[in-house]
Image (spheres, rainbow, N blue to C red):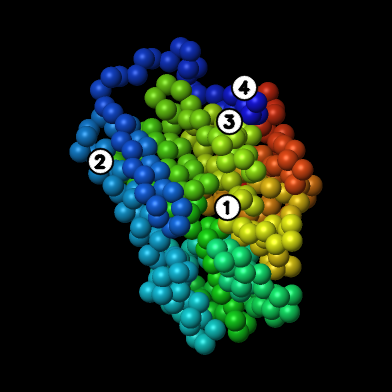
Amino acid sequence: MPFSLAATMPRPRVPYAHAARPSVRGQWFVRDEAIMGTAIHVELWCGDAVVGHAAADAVIQEMHRIDRAMSPYKPDSELSRVNREAFATPVPVSHEMFTLLQRAAHFSELSDGAFDITYAAVGQLYDYRAGTLPTRDAIARARQAVGHRQLRLDADPRSVRFAREGMRIDLGGFAKGHAVDTSVALLREFGIAHAIVSAGGDSRVIGDRRGRPWSVAVRDPRRADAIVAVLPLEDTSISTSGDYERYFERDGVRHHHLIDPKTGESPRTLRSVTILAADGLTCEALSKSVFVMGLDKGMRWVESLPGVDAIVVDAAGALHVSSGLLDARPQHAGDTPQ
């Protein structure tokens, strides 16, 4: 049986058992597409068919926009331009990109370097499709270009510079959460009050599901058809990072896409980390950070952050849940940790 948090997750403002019966007017609008190398899903309720279709389409267009700007695989993306030019000269960037890099730097400091977008200097050496593992010497050389404090951000003019040759940044641990957040902001502009937006393991829900909570499942890291937890959510964000997303095995060792910036290798003490918080960007950054930190340090850190909760599956398959999810008093994912 999967772990259920039905009794401990936030209660709605009006108890569901006594809620008014939903109006039959309106309908659900759903879009699914593969973007940013992951499955994009949007589901929303709207009373106007024209508005509903437009809102769902706007989410898909927004996901494509962010992919064009922040993909490290598109040579004409803003991120690729930064990676090509930022060691030679400061690179002017958009307000959106600059703000994201500032937030990344904030989470790097908050996590004592467990989250670090400059890990890409090492991360690019791994080929998960081909099962290519870099040598220890190659990792050691690339690690010289890793370090979030060597990413220089100048607010005036708004530019980015690399202080070390060979530096690269990758927003793969950040851009999907950002895309979910900006998509939710778009839906609110359309007046949508009930919706879910998902980008792979990152989801954010608006309101409830018309009289009942949204149910989001956390998959078993070793069995794709099984789940370890069912979470009834309302006005919350959730992100899961796992060692099963992109990986290969060599001599019985799993090498996956979650890289410890300090070692240049995959941490192996956990299988998955799920974070609940107020926004997708925070959830995604913290899920990566806790995975690198490990169970004890990661859970202590989560407990110190207001409005943040975690579900962790360790290397032995055991489930660990933060105290906020076990507290009998209803709690809501609160503000972004500062």
Q: Which residue is mark 1?
A: 245
| Residue for point 40% across, 60% down | 66
Left or right: residue 179 versus residue 251 is left
Q: Residue furthest bottom?
A: 88
Q: Which residue is mark 3?
A: 230
Closer to the camera: disc 4 or disc 1? 1
Could you give the CA–CA distance between mark 1 and mark 3, rounded to whole angstroms?
20 Å
Q: Earlier in the sequence, mark 4 or mark 1?
A: 4
Could you give the CA–CA distance between mark 3 and mark 2, rounded to whole angstroms?
29 Å
Q: The disc labelled 1 sits on which kind of residue?
A: Glu
Quick one: label 3, few (<14), some, or many (20+) residues within 10 Å? some
Q: Earlier in the sequence, mark 3 or mark 4?
A: 4
Q: For residue 319, what is the image quadrant? A: top right
Q: Which residue is mark 2?
A: 53
Could you give the CA–CA distance between mark 2 and mark 1, rounded to whole angstroms?
31 Å
Q: The disc labelled 4 sits on which kind of residue?
A: Ala
Residue 7: give its label: 4
| Residue for point 54% across, 79% down | 161
Could you give the CA–CA distance between mark 4 and mark 1, rounded to whole angstroms?
30 Å
| Residue for point 63% across, 59% down | 248
Q: The disc labelled 2 sits on which kind of residue?
A: His
Q: Earlier in the sequence, mark 2 or mark 4?
A: 4
Residue 88 at x, y percent in the picture: 52, 87
Quick one: label 4, few (<14), some, or many (20+) residues within 10 Å? some
- Secondary structure, mark 4, is loop
- Secondary structure, mark 2, is helix
